[in-house]
Amino acid sequence: MPEHHRPIRRPTRSFDNIVGSHDPAEETRIAHATASALLTRVRADDSGESADRLVAFTAEHGIDEIAELWSKAPSRTLPGALWRLYVLQLAIHGDPQTAALLYERGRVELASADAVVAGAPVPADPDELVVLIDAILHGAFRGDFAVALDRAAAFCRVQASGATHVADDYEATEPQRASELTTRALRLSSYAQDLSASAVLWRIDGLV
């Protein structure tokens, strides 16, 4: 049997560069089947222990193996939505200090209720953001899945706003850093749109 290695935890910068496997028809079928099976199995465990173990495992080991199956799935599908939740968890756990900086800046700058929907304390320190993203992921398996997606989308919008404004701060002195933050903001905004659309689809039994 081939040797299996522990997944490598990626730094936050690779948030914008995570690449999954090729996406032939069979891998697409498996991605949808495994996403549905995982969600069904964990939600069927009334004790909540399965959800706890799953959230803890992904926080410790990363998402490399899951990304192999789900990263190339269409964004507004069940595997696509789950993959985005896991990427958010990995990014926050990988660099909670930067996450807290961007979140707090976004909370101050963004004129919307997104910070309230996301549910972070005000202000949120790095440890509290780690707890928040784990709670959102846990809610996807134990609570209302659409609500979890909406909270994740709101979280992305707050972070995107923060990344945009911090990028503006760096533009004159550190253009490379500004470019990285702008790319991050665009990716987060895209995730927010996809997660919100997925929540709508889930509520009408259309997220597969």
Image (tube, grey):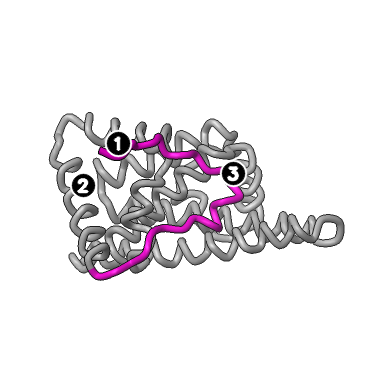
In what quadrant of the picture does the N terminus appear?
top left
The residue tagged 2 is 38
Identify the secondary structure beneath mark 1. helix
Question: Could you tell me how far apart the alpha carbons at marks 1 and 2 are, in whole angstroms?
Answer: 10 Å
Look at the magenta stretch and give its main secondary structure. Answer: loop
Kindly identify the residue that appears in the image at 65 percent across and 56 percent down: 163
Q: Nearest the camera: 190 or 147?
A: 190
Q: Could you tell which of marks 1 and 2 lies nearer the N-terminus?
A: 2
Q: Residue at x 44, y 41 (%)?
A: 133
Residue placed under numbered mark 3 in the picture:
99
- The amino acid pointed to by label 2 is Leu
Q: Amino acid at mark 3?
A: Ala
Outermost residue, right side: 173
Q: Nearer the viewer, residue 155 or 176?
A: 176
What amino acid type should be assigned to the residue bearing mark 1? Answer: Leu
Q: To which residue does mark 1 refer?
A: 54
The Cα atoms of the two marked residues, 2 and 3, are separated by 28 Å
Q: Quarter of the image containing the C terminus?
A: bottom left
Instruction: Name the residue located 62 percent from the left edge and 63 percent from the top edge.
Output: 183
Residue 5 x %, y %: 39, 36
- Give the answer, above or below, for where 80 lies relative to 91: below
Residue 197 in the figure: left or right of residue 35: right
Instruction: State the SS at label 3.
Output: helix
Range covered by the magenta-colored residues = 1-25
